[in-house]
Every structure is written in structure tokens, then in C-alpha cells.
Image (cartoon, rainbow, N blue to C red):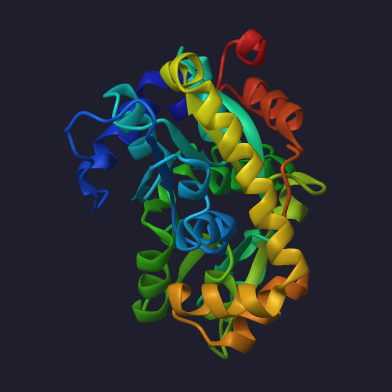
């Protein structure tokens, strides 16, 4: 508990430094007031955004969108701070850490509930208690939803939320999957669809922990966050985006075959694999936000955030 609890600024320094390795550069040009800059990350959790992008749904409402793909929430935060981003999608914990550090952003929608999992590349690692001190655990970044879920599980199992913190490696989901497959040493990856299923295609790979087990129930994986400036100056465009997002999710539910046709090439999987994801229940696209209070309560308890009024 001591390392990250002692100084929350160190956490944000780590997050900011990772932007340098984020693999994406955000432009510095000026933007039209009617344009929205929207950032997504990697994975099927963001599929409704792909639908909106590929079907030009915002343009149909007279709003232009600059789509940006970033590796983690720290990159989204930095882009917002430099006024190059209006909307970003991330897990609840990074949002709470930002609010705790006086970041001017607000959640305006949910996006996805998903089955997250901690996957091992070693058949001898079946539980948290099998993880040795030298074993590395890959996740998107410190303070990510995967990190906080791991901390919740460590608190339950060992009475120490920071039990695994010295073993963490930060990588994007695609890079983490490659590291998991290529490493000759025991490695674990805490990831999301489709990377969980891709990892489990390997015969000796196995789930060690699920997000629901760690959290103690269902929760929203990804939420949409708007910058303070966007709330003030582009509220009408954000309202349109909410409407379009609802339409995109409804279209995916009503026309899964068409959705699979559109999404499969984008994610470089087959039509049938995409259909399986859409119908498996591993991903639920919904605008409500579930689990915010539970995350805040835990993060306050162990010191990842310090201000009880963060959500007020």
C-alpha cells in the first residue's frame, strides 16, 4: 500500500511519462468549433465508436469528427490538457484519479461492460498465490481499471492492495498479447476482449482471475469522458454524439450480421468470430454507468485517491 499511497503525484508522473511511448502523436492544429476530437483505445470494447466512424453517423448530423487512437488514459489526459481532445474513452479508475487531481473532465456516458481476465502463459500459475515475485504482470498502465481490479483481488487474497505493484509492466493490449506469447519466462496479462480469447487459443494459457471475481460483481468497463472546455463550448455536439452512440448500439443489436460485416475487417478477425463476440455476452454495450461508487470507495480506502468529493 505504501508506494502508491504515499504520493499520488508519482502515479501521475508515471502516467505522463508513458505518453512518450504511447505510439500516437496528437496534432497541434486549430479546430473548427463544430468539430469533435474523440479518442478511443484498443479492443472490441470500442466497437460502437467504430460503427459511428465507419458509417459516418456524426457527419449525417452535420458534425465533423477527428478520430484519434491512443494507448492509455494518460495519453487521453495529456491530449485534453493541451486542448487537442474533446472526448476520450477510458476505465472508471483513471477518470477518478484525474478528478482527484483536479482534472476538469466529466463522465457523460457508459459504453461497455466486458469480461476482463488475467491470463497466464504458464500452466503452473492457476491462482494469485501461484504468482512468484519475479513474474511480470502486463496491463495498460498504473491506475488503469485492470490495475485497480488486480489491487482489489490482492487486497482480498493478501490483505495488501499493492502486493503486485512492483511486478507491473505497462503495454497496450496488442503489445501485451505479443509479449505474453513470446516470453519464455512466466508472464501474465490483464486484458479485455478480443485479447483474452486470442491468448486462450494457446493450449497452456489459462485464466487466473476475472474482472467480475476481483470486483465482486458486474461493472462498466469503459466510460465516455468530456473535457471541461468541451462541456462549455460544444455541449450541443456532445448531445448529438450521445444520440448517435445510442443509435449505433441499437443498430448493432438489431443487425448483428451487418455489424459483424463492418467490424470484422477493422479488428482483423473473421465474420464468425465477430458474431461470436457480439452474441457471447462477454461484451455488453450500454449507456448506463455501473460500479462508479464501488471503485471510488475502494480507491479512497487504499489511497489511490484522497478526495471524497471527487464525484460531487
- Looking at the image, which residue sits at the far right? 217
Q: Quadrant of residue 172?
A: bottom left
On screen, 232 above or below 302? above
Residue at 31% across, 30% down: 78
On screen, 273 above or below 109? below
Counting from the top left corner in percent of width and height, residue 205 is at: 56, 81
Counting from the top left corner in percent of width and height, residue 297 is at: 72, 24
Relative horizontal placement of residue 127, taking residue 30 as reference (left or right): right
On screen, 122 above or below 310? below
On screen, 2 above or below 160? above
Q: Nearer the viewer, residue 107 or 197?
A: 107
Counting from the top left corner in percent of width and height, residue 178 is at: 37, 74
Q: Nearer the viewer, residue 51 or 201?
A: 51
The quadrant of the picture occupied by the N terminus is top right
Task: Give the mark count.
Answer: 0
Q: Is residue 284 visible?
A: no
Q: Quadrant of residue 108?
A: top right
Residue at 42% across, 41% down: 38
Q: Is residue 167 visible?
A: yes
The quadrant of the picture occupied by the C terminus is top right
Residue at 67% across, 22% down: 301
Counting from the top left corner in percent of width and height, residue 66 is at: 34, 45
Amino acid at each position: 500500500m505504501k508506494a502508491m499511497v504515499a504520493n499520488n503525484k508519482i502515479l501521475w508522473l508515471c502516467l505522463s511519462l508513458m505518453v512518450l511511448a504511447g505510439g500516437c502523436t496528437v496534432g497541434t492544429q486549430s479546430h473548427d468549433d463544430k468539430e469533435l476530437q474523440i479518442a478511443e483505445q484498443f479492443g472490441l470494447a470500442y466497437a460502437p465508436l467504430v460503427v459511428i466512424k465507419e458509417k459516418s453517423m456524426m457527419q449525417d448530423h452535420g458534425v465533423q469528427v477527428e478520430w484519434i487512437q491512443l494507448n492509455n488514459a494518460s495519453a487521453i489526459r495529456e491530449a485534453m490538457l493541451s486542448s487537442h481532445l474533446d472526448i476520450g474513452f477510458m476505465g472508471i479508475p483513471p477518470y477518478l484519479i484525474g478528478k482527484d487531481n483536479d482534472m476538469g473532465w466529466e463522465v457523460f456516458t457508459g459504453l461497455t461492460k466486458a469480461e476482463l481476465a488475467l491470463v497466464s502463459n504458464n500452466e503452473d500459475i492457476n491462482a494469485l498465490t501461484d504468482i512468484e515475485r519475479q513474474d511480470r504482470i502486463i496491463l495498460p498502465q498504473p491506475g488503469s481499471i485492470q490495475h485497480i481490479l488486480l489491487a482489489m483481488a490482492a487486497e482480498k487474497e493478501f490483505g495488501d492492495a499493492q502486493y503486485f505493484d512492483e511486478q507491473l509492466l505497462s503495454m497496450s493490449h496488442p503489445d501485451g498479447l505479443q509479449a505474453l506469447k513470446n516470453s519464455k519466462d512466466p508472464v501474465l496479462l490483464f486484458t479485455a476482449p478480443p485479447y483474452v480469447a486470442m491468448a486462450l487459443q494457446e493450449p497452456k494459457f489459462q485464466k487466473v482471475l476475472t474482472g467480475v471475481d476481483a470486483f465482486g460483481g458486474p461493472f462498466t468497463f469503459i466510460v465516455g469522458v468530456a473535457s471541461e472546455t468541451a462541456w462549455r463550448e460544444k455541449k450541443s455536439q456532445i448531445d448529438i454524439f450521445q444520440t448517435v452512440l445510442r443509435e449505433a448500439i441499437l443498430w448493432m443489436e438489431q443487425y448483428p450480421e451487418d455489424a459483424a460485416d463492418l467490424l470484422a475487417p477493422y479488428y482483423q478477425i473473421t465474420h464468425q468470430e465477430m458474431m461470436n463476440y457480439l452474441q457471447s455476452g462477454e461484451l455488453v454495450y450500454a449507456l448506463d454507468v455501473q460500479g462508479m461508487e464501488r471503485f471510488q470507495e475502494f480507491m479512497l480506502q487504499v489511497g489511490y485517491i484522497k478526495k471524497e468529493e471527487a464525484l460531487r
